[in-house]
Image: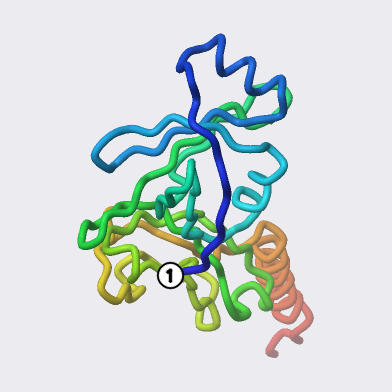
Amino acid sequence: MKKVSISGSLRENVGKKDAKKNRREGNIPCVIYGGEKQIHFFTNAIKFDKIIFTPEVTLINVAIDGKEYPTILQEVQYHPVTDKVLHADFLEIIPGKEITIGMPVILIGDAPGVMAGGQMIKKMHKIRLKGLAEHLPDNVEVDISNLVIGSSIKIKDVEFENLTTIDPPNSVIVRVKTSRNVEEDEEDEDEEGEEGEEGGEEAAPAAE
């Protein structure tokens, strides 16, 4: 798992008024939980960009008043209109304690079914995994190089070393279905074949 570091400062007051003040000043109100106590702090919004604009799960060392907290970003709240970050929740990583997190799914390879005209449907963008932080990958890679039309890859088809899946094993991650154009082409070919057969029968000379 990749590691990054950000710095923050403790919030003197916790509440809506203080949160609005921090946002006006270009900061993001945050909280770290999962340890002995919750830690309310704020961090610079610009520095925060490097940990949210990435498709991978990252180990984040949060430095506050000379002390570092190993965390992962658990949840981000956005403004419904402007999409600006309003608040962020960090989960503190405790040595020897398992955590649960949604890992992003990355598709690798080329699906033969797509090259044959099928349509690929990605049903799951994240898979919930449980395990120790040191065993967590940056993402979950799913190989689609054997995916043909009508087939799918389920959670039970993917191996997760030292990790437990929280989602049902029969959940479909990705599948390839027949596209409408392919179906129409096949129907046209069938109709042409039937017409050809009828025409051949009509053209055959009558036996005398």
Q: Secondary structure at mark 1?
A: loop
In the rendered image, the quadrant that contains the C terminus is: bottom right
| Near-viewer residue (17 or 176) | 17
State left or right for residue 23 relative to residue 71. Answer: right
User: Which residue in the protein does label 1 denote?
Assistant: 137
Asked where in the image residue 21 lies, by quadrant, the reply is: top right
2 in relation to 171, above or below: below
- Extreme residue toward the left, this view: 96
Residue 183 in view (yes/no): yes
Residue 136 at x, y = what percent? 37, 67
Q: Residues within 10 Å of mark 1 (few under 14, many from 20)?
A: some
85 in relation to 160, above or below: above
Residue 188 at x, y = what percent? 72, 65
| Near-viewer residue (23 or 112) | 23
Asked where in the image residue 29 lies, by quadrant, the reply is: top right
- Extreme residue toward the top, this view: 17
The residue sitting at 59% across, 77% down in the picture is 111
The residue sitting at 47% across, 47% down in the picture is 66
Residue 150 at x, y = what percent? 49, 68
| Near-viewer residue (201 or 188) | 188
Residue 167 in view (yes/no): no
Residue 200 at x, y = what percent? 74, 81
| Near-viewer residue (133 or 199) | 133
Number of on-image labels: 1
The residue sitting at 49% across, 73% down in the picture is 141
89 in relation to 6, above or below: above
- Extreme residue toward the front, this view: 66
State left or right for residue 165 relative to residue 127. Answer: left
113 in relation to 171, above or below: below
Amino acid on which the number 1 mark rests in the picture? Pro
